[in-house]
Image: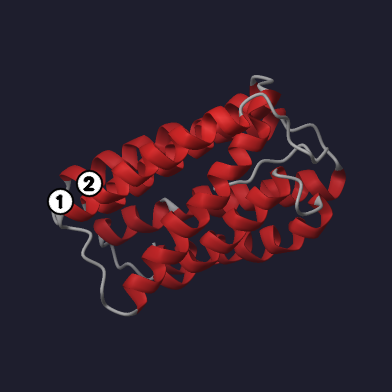
Amino acid sequence: MGSVGLLYVGAVLFVNGAMLLGWVKGTSAAPLNVFVGLLQVFTPTYLIVTANGDTGQILGASGLYLFGFTYLYVAYNLFFDLDGSGLGWFSGFVAVCAVVYAYLNFTRSPTDPTFGVIWLYWAFLWGLFWLVLARGAEHLGRYTGAVAAVEGWVTGVLPAFLLLTGNWKGNQAGWAIAWAVFGVLAFGLLYPRLRGTRTATTAPAPAAA
């Protein structure tokens, strides 16, 4: 994922997480979802068109659509106050794909195990969206918002700035372990505090990775 696009993925995750936590109204979050969604559709299209058959570049670009379509779907649901079940099932599809992208980051050369862990973060988050929107697990609403807000910084903003400044060392096992340990601890500690508390917003859209 392009480092610039990743930065704005972090921004929209944080804002949408704040929406599910009740800090931001749904209609106020919708425009950012449109902006970032369009960016994450235009960018992979350009990368694929200019790839000249480079399968590695095409594979890397393909995952960006998962983000772009999710954010546009969120905005559409918010603008038109739609039922969120369709978005929930799409989120389930994305969660499965995210596991595949994680596996590829762990196994394909050159490997990037840290981004493999980050894709697992996203699989977990989208899995929560599926539970909340498609399976009616409304008691996980605020927990999902908190996870999304944290992931905005840990999977978006921080990696983006490390990439932009040339300091990313994702191929080092120590980095991958650190990212994994943080996620397990942070989300494990948040769960008993926020489980059973429904989202404060009535909007049917998730915090959208």
Mark 1 surroundings: few (<14), some (14-19) or many (≥20) residues within 10 A: few
Q: Residue 177 has which mark?
A: 2
**Between residues 139 and 72, which one lies in front from this camera angle?**
139
Residue 14 higher or lower than 160, as above or below: above
Q: Position of residue 151 (x, y in %)?
A: 49, 51
Residue 94 can be seen, yes or no? no
Name the residue: 53% across, 31% down: 191
Residue 79 in the image: state x and y as whole percent. Answer: 84, 50
- Secondary structure beneath label 2: helix
Q: As shown in the figure, which amino acid type bears the numbered disc 2?
A: Ile
Residue extending furthest toward the bottom = 165
Q: Amino acid at mark 1?
A: Ala
Relative placement, left or right, of 42 versus 140 is: left
Give the structural element (helix, strand or loop) at label 1.
Answer: helix
The picture places residue 58, in percent across and down from the top left corner, at 34, 57
Image check: 157 left or right of 54? right
Relative to 115, 206 lies left or right: right
115 vs 40: above or below: above
Instruction: Return the residue at label 1.
Output: 173
Identified at 70% across, 25% down, the residue is 138
